[in-house]
Amino acid sequence: MKPLRIGIIGYGFMGRAHSNAYRKVSNFFDLEYQPVLQAACARDEAKVKAFAERWGYASIETDWRKLIARDDIDLIDIAVPNNLHAEMAIAAAKAGKMILCEKPLGFDSKAAEKMVAAVTKAKVPNMVWYNYRRCPAVVLAKQLIDEGKLGRIFHYRANFLQDWTISAELPQGGAALWRLDVKAAGSGVTGDLLAHCIDTALWLNGGIKDVSAMTETFIKERKHNLTGKVEKVGIDDACAFLCHFNNGSLGLFESTRYARGHKALYTLEINGEHASIRWDLHDLHRLQWFDHRDEGVVRGWRSIHVSDSDHPYMKNWWVPGLQIGYEHSFVHQVADFLKGLETGVPARPDFQDGLATDYVVDAVLASAKSHQWKKVKQVKQK
Ligand code: SOE
């Protein structure tokens, strides 16, 4: 086994999800490379020390530049707020490190373009943590689409609904609430939640040509944790957009943090000429399937329990019928990244794919601002 020494920046929700994946992957997947938890980095020494001890990192750093400069680190994992992604990734690429970066890739597409240029120049392996591509049911959907089982695609519909920011008393900014601070996040639900839906859509249904969007900020002012003052809220609390895909199908996307009762309801539905599929993150191990070619009297929606050994990734886990969950999507992403190093066929979404999503996000925000349809900048096809 070849050790792959990881230096992670950030110890929040994603720092934990990624660390768990690095620890588990070699137990369940046969791979040439084995992640080694070499160093964890964050500004707060006491907190990063506690994180490192809990997850088994061998050392800590409090300055990310020192982490990147270390010779005993092969891969930098960026699990910090969006406004820090570009500077860290560009420095890591210059130092010749592999990079795994949290989504969305850039604070905006301009930043993402610079990140793509940096990894292209340095020729370092790179990937963006759009983990929902790695849920077995979503991969099964991809297989069915690629096999042509749906026929021509007419509609792509996706939602990502949450309800955790409805209280006007919730402050913005700082540790767990940076997602509400436009200076740290870049945007609200569009970059945080719809970015997931867009990434999956580009993967399953190809490029998006143009968009027409609306956004709303329901709570206009919130106390800022870093300044202590009540400040204007700059993020979008809700966003809905229509789009045309390059394959001629129509898209309809909606996201909000104001859908009382919904915690992380990511759903997608695709309607094709012969068949439709539907997936729901709250029931992530199932794929709903309707095939018009089934015999008439028994035709209907099927709920496929994606847990058989011939389903994507499942032979690496338990016996048929026993399901897996959210954290496994991150394990799969690491497994695929390591396999990519081994085979020379890089796993995706890489930074260029992340840029493609950021182009859609930027077009959505621009359309909502101008009340006009906006063309989406396209990335070079691979
Ligand atoms: C926001 O609540 C959030 O944690 C996103 O930042 C994640 O990307 C998403 O997977 C779940 O929701």
Image (cartoon, rainbow, N blue to C red):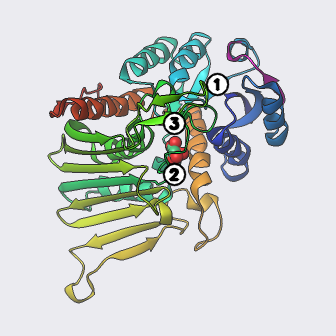
Q: Is residue 112 above or below residue 369?
A: above
Q: Earlier in the sequence, mark 3 or mark 2?
A: 2
The CA span between labels 3 and 1 is 22 Å
**Picture quarter with the C terminus:** top left
Q: Is mark 3 within 8 Å of ligand 1?
A: yes
Please state which amino acid type lies under the numbered disc 3: Arg
Please give the name of the residue rendered at 85% of the width and 37% of the height, measured from the top-left corner. Answer: 53
Residue 119 screen position, x and y as percent? 49, 17
Q: Badge 2, how many Cα within 10 Å: few under 14, some, many 20+?
A: some
Q: What is the count of numbered marks?
A: 3
User: Tags 3 and 2 in contact by the CB under 8 Å rule?
Assistant: no
Residue 265 screen position, x and y as percent? 44, 58
Q: Earlier in the sequence, mark 3 or mark 1?
A: 1
Please state which amino acid type lies under the numbered disc 1: Ile
In the image, 248 versus 182, the foreground residue is 182
Please give the name of the residue rendered at 42% of the width and 18% of the height, measured from the top-left corner. Answer: 111
- What residue did someone put label 3 on? 179
- In this view of the protein, can residue 284 be seen by the observer? no
Residue 365 picture quarter: top left
Q: Secondary structure at mark 1?
A: strand
Q: Is mark 2 within 8 Å of ligand 1?
A: yes
Residue 88 picture quarter: top right
Please give the name of the residue rendered at 70% of the width and 11% of the height, measured from the top-left corner. Answer: 69
- What residue did someone put label 2 on? 164
Q: Badge 3, how many Cα within 10 Å: few under 14, some, many 20+?
A: many
Q: Give the magenta range.
A: 58-65
The CA span between labels 2 and 1 is 31 Å
From the image, state whether disc 2 or disc 1 is nearer to you: 2
Please give the name of the residue rendered at 45% of the width and 39% of the height, measured from the top-left corner. Answer: 192
